[in-house]
Amino acid sequence: MIPIRQNGRKLRYAAGFAACLTVLLPHAAHAIPAFAAQTGEPCSACHIGFPQLTPYGRDFKLEGYIAGGMFPTWKNVALMSQIGLTQLHDKVPGGLAPGFKSNDAWAAQQTSLFYGGALDAKLGLGAFIQVTYDGVARQWHWDNTDIRLARPGTLFGTPLFYGFTVNNAPGVTDLWNTPPSWGYPYIPSELANGPTAEQQIPALAQGVYGFGAYSALNLTPEDMIYAEADLYKSLPNRLSYALGVGPATQIKGVIPYLRFAFQHTWGNSSFEVGSYALFDRPYPQGMIDGPTDRILDVAADSQFQYITAKQAFSVQANVIHESQDWRASYPLGLAGNPSDTLNTITLTVSELLFQKYGITESFNTIYGNEDPVLYAASPIGGSANGKPNTNSWTTELDYYPFNNGGPAWLPWLNAKFFVENTMYPTFNGLARNYDGAGRSAGANDTLFAGIWLAF
């Protein structure tokens, strides 16, 4: 485990935040607001801490979010907020974001309204719909959306569950939450500095809309094969602005996304190994017609869980390789090479004790070949040596006061108090002077402490 940097201000903030946690008394309550109100199950039935899913949580999602419900009621509407303090090791001149201080900044960074649960249980129709107010960008936007029609069946006498989905992000439908849509960090600071490089799968989130089909075949009571295929289109530019996510990346034609996974369960344990892939043909930045580039993302992932009444242990691994063919951007001078590669590896280990006290350790690395145009240094960051390479370690401590039940006046109230410490040995290609202006990778080390509250 990577220790928290011995910085006086960081330790004072962390100690003060921890002191606040100790005065909170555990109550008896229920889980994620809309789904908990519908099912009557505690949060721990579906989650190893939000948003990692347990086997029950995966079944609930697979079967269309309908368990315990029939039609929409007021209980299917929920509200969520994230409030936190962001402190970088070194301040950012000019502010962490427009309207925010150069360091030690508080933000109500996200407030979301949800609909979650059955639309028509007899048809197998249910939904997860999120609309979010971004407190940093100061605007509303549509967020993760997954509307499902799910049905049970058989294939040659073998139990089969199949369904159809309308959604707005590759990977938002995932049962194991290893792709970027739900992967770690679960609650990142929106004010912290982030790497310049980003792969296509996370970049497309909410900038597309799509339709897909999926199936889960139970070979035995312990073994399941899962397959999913989705086709996406980029949002029209005017619509992307109307939904608060403009300008959306404009893609020619459809974007295929494929997902395969195998899961084995035994006793209190489960193990998954799988793969997913996406291919698209984006237009160069600012264009909506003409030649296109080619981007292919191919990923592998795995998850192990061990869950008992007193503890929940989880290990996740996710690897994405991206091939970038700049056949349209390179002639325009928007890329320094005709083609590039970009890779991301994320390893996450988490432990939740007594459904209240959690610790997570995560390692993330981004690496690829040098491209002095694509990753060019600028006054707001970039890479002085043209490389995207970034390594980070994150240690997170959590406290869930309502995971096993709570106040009678609001039985589905849920909350998470957290402290995250992220350290960067390398940032945008270098350990020192990565931006050509003297800033070191460690200057972006971040302490982020706050509360996630849902009701």
Image (cartoon, helix red, strand yellow):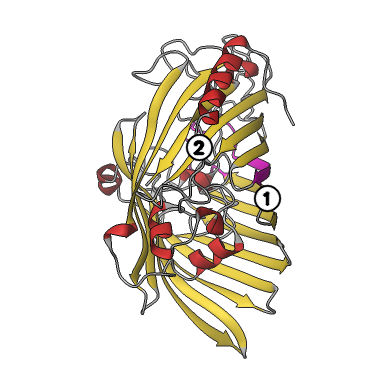
Cα separation between marks 1 and 2 = 20 Å
Q: Is residue 197 magenta?
A: no
Q: Is residue 211 visible?
A: no
Pointer 2: what residue? 25
* Drawn side of residue 201 relative to residue 135, left or right: right
Among all residues in the image, which is located at the extreme bottom? 157
Report how many numbered discs are placed on residues in the image: 2
What amino acid is at disc 1?
Gln
Which segment did they paint magenta? 325-353
At 60% from the left edge and 9% from the top edge, which residue is drawn?
438
* Drawn side of residue 320 relative to residue 22, left or right: right
Q: Element at badge 2?
A: loop
Q: Element at badge 1?
A: strand
Mark toward the viewer: 1 or 2: 2
Task: Tell me which corner region of the image, top left, top right, bottom left or bottom right, holds residue 277.
Answer: bottom right
At 63% from the left edge and 14% from the top edge, which residue is drawn?
440
The correct choice, above or below, for 137 with respect to 442 in the image is: below
Pointer 1: what residue? 311
Which one is earlier in the sequence, the residue at label 1 or at label 2?
A: 2
At 58% from the left edge and 63% from the top edge, which residue is drawn?
259
Q: Position of residue 182 (x, y in %)?
A: 53, 48
* Drawn side of residue 368 relative to residue 331, left or right: right
Q: Position of residue 82 (x, y in %)?
A: 42, 35
